[in-house]
Amino acid sequence: MEYVNLLKLCVGADSVEDLEDWQTSQRGRWPAGRAEHVTRMWPKREADLLAGGSLFWVIKGVILCRQRLLGLEERRGSDGIARCALVLDSKVIRTEAAPRRPFQGWRYLAPEDSPRDLAPGRAADDALPPDLARALAEIGLR
């Protein structure tokens, strides 16, 4: 079975470190080794996502990282409405920068259209400012 990824805006984060810091601050809410992101809609391609997919995060207009999808679980808000928790591996994997225009919700992302993971030695590099990362990605230099 071919897998598929999800693409989601990381609203409120200015960097990968912001995402990591927020998830670290929330760890007491989730089982060890997991993180969650709750979204309104349930993906119709659940089996394809769980066959090896990841959630790719768009930060300030640029895909910069991903987290492996472990499952989808129902969550009910205080309003009683059922939502979908994207259950993620807690490890945030940095990727090559890839610009993306704003969108609402999430989008499916085919593996062949997904940015590659950064080499292990590059994952610790200082992050470029988002505008510079976006400009370099647009001309194919990052």
Image (tube, rainbow, N blue to C red):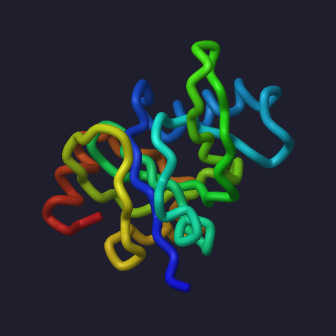
Does residue 121 appear in the picture of this structure? no
Residue sitting at the far top: 78
**Residue at 75% over, 46% down:** 34
Please report the residue visible at 42 percent of the width from the left and 24 percent of the height from the top.
12
Q: Is residue 55 visible?
A: yes
Q: Which of 26 and 116 is in front in this view?
A: 26
Q: Where does residue 123 sit, x and y in percent of width and height?
A: 55, 58
Left or right: where 71 falls relative to 102: right
Q: Quarter-wise, where is residue 120 in the image?
A: bottom right
The correct choice, above or below, for 115 with respect to 56 in the image is below
In the image, residue 102 sits, relative to residue 118, either above or below, namely: above
The one of 31 and 20 positioned closer to us in this rendering: 31
Farthest bottom residue in view: 1
Give the image location of residue 37, x and y in percent.
58, 38
The N terminus, quarter of image? bottom right
Q: Closest to the observer: 96 or 42?
A: 42
Q: What's the residue at 64%, 51% (across, down)?
A: 72
Q: Where 110 sits versus 11, above or below?
A: below
Would you place residue 88 above or below residue 20 in this image? below
**Residue 42, position in %: x, y?**
51, 47
- Name the quarter where the C terminus is drawn: bottom left
| Residue reaching furthest to the right | 32
Q: In the displayed structure, does residue 121 sit left or right of residue 44?
A: right
Q: Give left or right: position of 140 versus 129.
A: left
* Residue at left offset 64%, top offset 14%: 78
